[in-house]
Amino acid sequence: MVTVGNSISIDLALLNDDRTGGATPSTLTPVQRLTGVLRAQLLNAVDAIRSGLLTYESLRNISEVIGGEYGDRVIFELLQNAHGAHDEGEDGSILLKLMFHGPERGDLFVANRGKGFTWENVNAIRNVGVSSKSVGEGIGNKGLGFRSVETLADDPRIYSQTEARSAEAFDGY
């Protein structure tokens, strides 16, 4: 058991539990793939803490600065991301829905009918200052705009499928 900070404990035995059944990366489901990445990141965090590195504290601080710089642009950044999911010249569709659950709580949904998240998009969102787009490819390419969501939400979530289709259960990233 390793304790991170004052309140987070990580049971290392759970991190070493492999539930992929020996699947290769190309046959993993999105949930298995993300679970594997999370497990690897937690092990990396434990190693960093044991070594006295402040990697994750530094990244958290950078994220807070970026969120503050982009904070007044949250809706604009989310609209840009939704727009960027559509191919150039395509008649796209974007929906914003704000639901209030009381004076201090609400949900903001931003949806589009563009391309779904790929593994490169997931990797870009997980890292500060990384983009899956090249310079000049669509709007935004610095990998910073989505960080502004962190000024509004403690637990931002992205739901996506690589192709739009009906399914019994969610099977995307």
Image: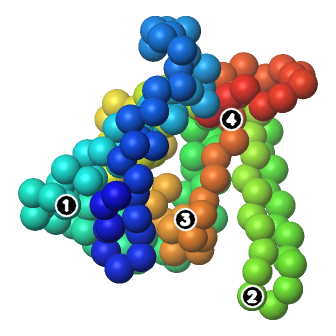
SS at mark 2 in the image? loop
Q: CA distance from mark 2 to mark 4?
A: 27 Å
Mark 1: which amino acid?
Ile
Q: Is residue 109 visible?
A: yes
Position in image of residue 125 (x %, y %) = 45, 45
Closest to the observer: 84 or 67? 67
Label 2 neighbourhood size at 10 Å, few (<14), some (14-19), many (20+)? few
SS at mark 1 in the image? helix
Quadrant of the image for the C terminus? top right
Q: Residue at x 45, y 43 (%)?
A: 14
Q: Is residue 100 above or below residue 158?
A: below
| Residue on which disc 1 sits | 49
Q: CA distance from mark 1 to mark 4?
A: 33 Å
Sequence-wise, the earlier of marks 2 and 1 is 1
Mark 4: which amino acid?
Ser
**C-beta proximity under 8 Å, tags 2 and 4:** no
Q: Is residue 44 above or below residue 171?
A: below
Position in image of residue 20 (x %, y %) = 53, 20
Which of label 2 and label 1 is nearer to you?
A: 1
Closest to the observer: 102 or 68? 102
Q: CA distance from mark 4 to mark 3?
A: 17 Å
Mark 3: which amino acid?
Val
| Residue on which disc 3 sits | 149
Mark 2: which amino acid?
Glu
Quadrant of the image for the N terminus? bottom left
| Residue on which disc 4 sits | 160
| Residue on which disc 2 sits | 104
Closest to the observer: 168 or 152? 168
Sequence-wise, the earlier of marks 2 and 3 is 2
Q: CA distance from mark 2 to mark 3?
A: 16 Å
